Image (cartoon, grey):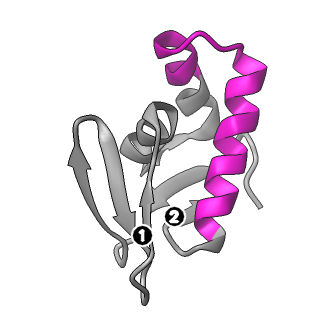
Amino acid sequence: MVDKDSYISRSDKAAYKVIDNEAMVVTPGSNKQYVFNLVGFKIWEMANGEIDIRKIARAICEEFNVTYEQAVKDAIEFAEELSVKGLLEVKS
């Protein structure tokens, strides 16, 4: 489960490429591809295992016109979805 105190990191098994500020990611063990919008790309880019959801949400607020509460909610949902797909790892 992902919460505000969670640290997220990109899975070593996920292959990705950045093109024009969009991340194209391939799911481990399959040929599924995902393309993230600018907010998703920002979260993906910051998912280094050393930054918690709160700091990611603050960065989203600074770059995009969104409230902190909405940024936290979006970052948590994004991280949960990608962790289920094996693209992100979550640590508390």
Q: Which residue is mark 1?
A: 11
- The picture places residue 83, in percent across and down from the top left corner, at 61, 67
Position of 61 with respect to 67 (left or right) is left
Q: Is residue 34 above or below residue 38?
A: below
Instruction: Tell me the quarter of the image containing the C terminus.
Output: bottom right
- Disc on the earlier residue, 2 or 1: 1
- The picture places residue 42, in percent across and down from the top left corner, at 43, 35
Do labels 2 and 1 touch, CB within 8 Å?
Answer: yes
Task: Give the Cα distance between marks 2 and 1.
Answer: 5 Å
Note whether residue 64 is visible.
yes
Q: Nearer the viewer, residue 19 or 13?
A: 19
Q: Nearer the viewer, residue 82 or 49?
A: 82
Q: Which residues are magenta?
A: 58-83
Q: Is residue 42 above or below residue 35?
A: above
Mark 1 residue element: loop
Question: What's the amino acid at mark 2?
Answer: Leu
Q: Which mark is residue 88?
A: 2
- The picture places residue 46, in percent across and down from the top left corner, at 41, 40
- The picture places residue 62, in percent across and down from the top left corner, at 50, 11
* Residue at (42, 69) in percent of width and height: 11
Position of 70 with respect to 21 (left or right) is right
Position of 4 with respect to 14 (left or right) is right
